[in-house]
Amino acid sequence: MAMITPPPDIPPAVLQADAVVDEGGTLTAVEAAELGLAPATRPRGLLRRGWDVFAENKLALASLAVLVFIVLFCFLGPVFYHTDQVHTNLQQYLCRPGAGHLLGCNDLGYDELGRLMVGGQTSLEVGVAAAVVAVIFGTLYGAISGFVGGPVDAFLMRLVDAGLSIPYIMVIIILSVVFHPTTIVMIFIIAVFYWLGVARLVRGETLTLRTREYVQAVKVIGGRRIRAVVRHVVPNAVGTIIVQATFAVADSILILAGLGFLALGVQPPATDWGSMLSGGLTYLQAGGYWWLIYPPGIAIILTCIAFNFIGDALRDAFETRLQRR
Amino acid sequence: MIGFLVRRILQAILVTFFVTVFTLALVHAFPGGPVRALLGPRATPAQVAFFNHEYGFDQPFYVQYGRWVWQLLQGNLGYSIKLNQTITSELKQYLPNTIVLVGLGTIVSLLFGIPLGVYQAVRRYTLGDYVLTGVSFLGYATPVFFIALLLVEWFSVDVHLFPAAPSGNTFGALLGNPRAIVLPIVAYAFLLYALWSRYMRSSVMDNLVQDYVRTARAKGASERRVLWGHIFRNSLISIVTLLGLSLPTLVAGAIFIEVVFNWPGMGLAFYTAAQNVDYATLLGFTLVATVATIVGNLLADVGYAVLDPRVRYS
């Protein structure tokens, strides 16, 4: 066996590092420092460095604040502002905004401000849940497809192509007609189409990651392929995935709003921001019922813009080249 | 090029196969299957059995699939018992109207989106760029039906500038009263504007730093010639692809706009069918839109290959 001479720029301690490396095979910061690999000062973590980049983006910070406000408004608001969102009260039919009802009432006598809170809960919950379901499934599908490669990959991706060529809104409408969805079913109906795009994206990411040495090394050591996918490919694609998830929340909220607007969304007395706008359409021609249109519309826009800005900033935050070390 | 075309067309056929299987499977996923959908929950078992036999629903899936595809190939898209009309005749009635909306809306959005995208790239990081970026962010985050509602509220209810709905049901009537189709087309164009302008902006910015731009400048080409003769032409290539890929967005937009403005097109008919639980219409329209999307993707890819020779060999 030929002798391998180490390159001169590696500190000698590293070459005897087996003694120092802990059981998990990783170096602690102190150990690394002793080996001359890193400064002895405590290095800033990945999250910390990511946050610094994120915090430089004023738009993203403002968006985060808006989002926190909207979440508090929807979930804590009803604690302070009591309204009956279950029983209709026709005496308050389309009452104007005033002392008792800050944003007036709709045609069934529901207080509009209270409804904005309750509807917002549905919109946010369904949006986040659908995004999570779609992203988890799409990630696994895309990672496996990209990692296995060959005919399996080709087949799996043609399925995704087929799914993406069906105008999603039509199938979502059909599914809503068929299932009369509860909130839980709604989440899956929205996720059914959203995972396709995620799968395609993660597959692309996997294709580049699988050729990296550390992923190849798993195979050399004798690790199973599923281990390489779950432990190495997915964690390294996590930046892309989280960014995608952020946009997915905004898109899911928009899709839910669209279904609600077509009166195919969650079943009454539950509501969401889109369903509220649907009521606005009915009284549009009469004119003057601004409180039926603007509050839910602006709520949808604010939330979606906030998620989009945060997604953009997260993309920068995960871009290691922008991080100051 | 021939090889590329053959490969791409085979791929499209495979995707079409998957989609048709999926669509037929969707019919069978309905609670009680297609029979209950048509006969209602009160049909007796004997009626159900007779109906199943009559329409071949008691056959194995692949037999049903084969028959159905054979019918499709002959141009028979199905029959809506609720409307007492074939899907083909519904298409003849509604498709031209939808093409007016989608066509004009897309053209208007391109006329604004492309030049403004170029402007943003050339004057990047200036006030004008930021303002237009804000506008397109609004376009992304605003549901298209909300834009439509606002347009009606502002320009039809508050100020009687434009009617809130087109006046006729036919292709001729739509075009005969141009004032009545302004608002739907503006709403539709706003939906798409953000897509084109964002894409054009980044595409031009990518091209600005390419070597060929430096070469053109070094040869003494004027800035105007560099921008419109070189960069613009190369950036347009990606818009062609994007157009082909955006068909699902175009369809979604058409449904919402047609519902708000009562536009007599496929989207409104689809929505009405959804409310009447008219499965034949729902599936027929979905299939037509899907095949249109597949063909659109195919044309986009081929167009891309024609415009950019590098693609053919990869």
Image (cartoon, rainbow, N blue to C red):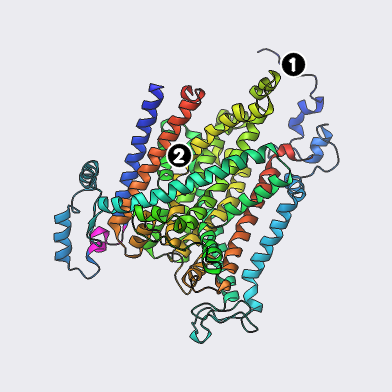
User: Does B36 lie within the magenta span?
Assistant: yes
A294 or A15: nearer the eye?
A294
Q: Amino acid at mark 2?
A: Gly
Q: Give me the C-alpha separation between circle 1 and circle 2.
A: 57 Å
Figure check: B289 above or below B275? above
Residue A303: tell me if it is visible.
yes
Figure check: B49 above or below A280? above
User: Does A37 lie within the magenta span?
Assistant: no
Q: What residue does disc 2 label?
A: B244
Q: Secondary structure at mark 1?
A: loop
Contact? badges 1 and 2 (CB < 8 Å): no
Q: Is residue B95 left or right of residue B54?
A: right
Q: Is residue A2 left or right of residue A125?
A: right
Q: Amino acid at mark 1?
A: Thr
Quadrant containing the N terminus of chain B is top left
User: Please, which residue is most extreme toward the bottom here?
Assistant: A91
Name the chain letter of the residue that bears numbered label 1. A
Q: Secondary structure at mark 2?
A: helix
B304 or B260: nearer the eye?
B260
Name the chain letter of the residue that bears numbered label 2. B
The location of residue B102, given as percent across then percent down, is 44, 48
Q: What residue does disc 1 label?
A: A5
Main secondary structure found in the magenta portion: helix
Q: Quadrant of residue A35?
A: top right
First to last magenta residue range: B30-38
Q: Which circle marks residue B262 in the picture? A: none
